[in-house]
Every structure is written in structure tokens, then in C-alpha cells.
Image (cartoon, rainbow, N blue to C red):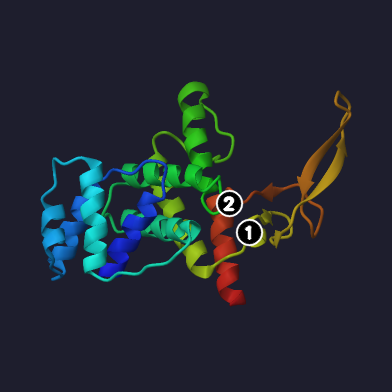
């Protein structure tokens, strides 16, 4: 990684509700390994047992030494950090449990932004599986395949972010009748028991209620492929 990439990762992590200042020490060690030098960097790299305030002080002194001027909004920093963590999970530079825990923090710190909401939904479903053996959002998720499922979500997240797929496109469903991605509509249905009338989501093209929803990985990959074709 470059100096800027290393520093953007630290900035992004600092935007979360909880930040372990030991990562500033790791940052200093990594920057030194790139060939950059300063007295403050060397001091920070040795602060394994120091308090957060001391680490923070030498971090900002090191930033000044390196003449780094990175001006990004908190939202941009968080987005950059989320992409970094997801890519590291995919390449196995970090474990999937650690990456998932960071993504859960990002969900909360971002105010449950739609870009990251899938990781909140997976977390909720894992709780339901433990206590009720059911899921609310992800039908294909089990306790046994959770690591593989989360890794697949990381891959989808990186693809969607790299393609800058807008929210309205991400929220499309797939119709198993007409085989199209579509914006679902509400449709009234009737039955011979209470409630006699009820509402379902239906295909916005053909009206069929045989839909796969956008939490489904297959649907997400279809959205990605369509976006690639459209671009």
C-alpha cells in the first residue's frame, strides 16, 4: 500500500465509534517500511504500551513531518475504509470475522447507510438463527455457511461500489416469471380465509408475485451484470 492509502485507512477507522489507538503504532511501522523517516515516526512505532493520548500526539506530529494534507469528508473516509476492509477480506489479508466486525461498526457509524445495510441484515439473521433457527432477510444464510456467505457479500459490496451503482438500481427485484429485473409494485390478493384481502409485492413489468428480492445474492449479481452492460 502507498503512504496515502495507509493513512486513509487510519483516517477511515478513526471515523468509527470505537478506534484502537494501537493501530497508529502499526501505521507508523508500515510507513517506516515504505522508506519514510522522521523522529516522531520512530517514536510512535515504539509506543506499544503507551496511552492513547501519547500515540495520538505523535501520530499528528508524524502527519506534519510527512506533509500529508488529506481533506475528505467523514462519509468519504468511511466509504474508503469499508472498501479497504472488504478487499483485504477477499484477499485474505484480514480474517472474515474481523472484517465483518468492522463492517458492523461502519453500518452503525454511517447511520445505517444503504451501502452497508446488508451487513446489518446478516448480523440480525445470525442472531435469529441462533435463537429461532430462522432468518428475516437472507434465506440462504445458515450458521454453517456464514463465513462463506459474508465473504460473498464482501465481493458484491466491492463490485457495487466500484461500479457506483445507485440506490434505486440496488433495490430492484428479479421476476422468475418474465426473467427481468424490475421495480416491484404492491398488488392485492384474495383468499377464502382471514385476512380475505392482503397485499404482496409483484413484478412491476408482468405483475407476477414470483419475485426474488434484492437481499438475494443471485439478484445482486444480476444487478451488477446489468450495470456492467449498461456502462
Badge 1 vs badge 2, beta-carbon distance below 8 Å: yes
Badge 1 marks a residue whose secondary structure is: helix
Identify which residue is drawn at 52% across, 69% down.
163
Q: Quadrant of the C terminus?
A: bottom right
Relative vertical location of residue 83 with respect to residue 103 in this rendering, above or below? below
Q: Is residue 83 visible?
A: yes
Identify which residue is drawn at 61% across, 58% down.
170
Alpha carbon of mark 1 to alpha carbon of mark 2: how far? 7 Å
Relative vertical location of residue 67 with respect to residue 55 in this rendering, above or below? below
Image position of 97 (left or right of 227): left
Identify which residue is drawn at 42% across, 67% down.
71
Badge 2 marks a residue whose secondary structure is: loop
- Circle 1 residue: 167
Question: Which image quarter: residue 33?
Answer: bottom left
User: How would you rate the neighbour count of disc 2 (Cα within 10 Å): few for under 14, some for 14-19, many for 20 or more?
Assistant: few
Position of residue 174 measured from the top left corner of the image (x, y, whole percent): 67, 56
Q: Can residue 1 be seen in this view?
A: no
Position of residue 166 measured from the top left corner of the image (x, y, whole percent): 62, 63
Question: Which mark, by number, is residue 216?
Answer: none
Q: Quadrant of the N terminus?
A: bottom left
Amino acid at each position: 500500500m502507498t503512504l496515502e492509502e495507509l493513512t486513509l485507512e487510519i483516517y477511515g477507522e478513526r471515523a468509527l465509534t470505537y478506534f484502537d489507538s494501537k493501530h497508529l503504532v502499526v501505521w507508523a511501522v508500515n510507513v517506516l517500511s515504505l522508506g519514510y523517516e522522521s523522529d516522531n515516526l520512530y517514536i510512535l512505532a515504539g509506543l506499544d504500551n503507551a496511552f492513547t493520548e501519547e500515540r495520538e500526539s505523535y501520530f499528528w506530529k508524524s502527519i506534519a513531518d510527512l506533509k500529508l494534507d488529506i481533506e475528505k469528508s467523514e462519509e468519504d473516509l468511511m466509504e474508503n475504509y469499508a472498501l479497504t476492509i472488504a478487499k483485504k477480506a477477499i484477499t485474505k489479508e484480514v480474517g472474515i470475522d474481523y472484517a465483518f466486525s468492522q463492517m458492523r461498526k461502519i453500518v452503525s457509524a454511517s447511520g445505517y447507510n444503504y451501502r452497508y445495510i446488508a451487513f446489518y441484515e446478516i448480523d440480525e439473521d445470525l442472531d435469529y438463527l441462533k435463537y429461532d433457527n430462522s432468518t428475516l432477510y437472507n434465506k440462504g444464510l445458515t450458521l454453517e455457511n456464514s463465513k462463506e456467505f459474508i465473504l460473498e457479500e464482501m465481493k458484491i459490496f466491492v463490485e457495487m461500489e466500484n461500479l457506483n451503482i445507485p440506490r434505486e438500481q440496488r433495490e430492484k427485484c428479479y421476476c422468475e416469471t418474465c426473467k427481468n429485473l424490475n421495480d416491484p409494485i404492491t398488488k392485492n390478493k384474495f383468499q377464502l380465509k382471514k385476512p380475505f384481502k392482503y397485499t404482496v409485492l409483484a413484478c412491476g413489468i408482468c405483475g407476477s408475485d414470483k419475485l426474488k428480492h434484492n437481499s438475494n445474492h443471485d439478484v445482486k449479481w444480476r444487478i451488477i451484470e446489468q450495470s456492467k452492460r449498461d456502462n
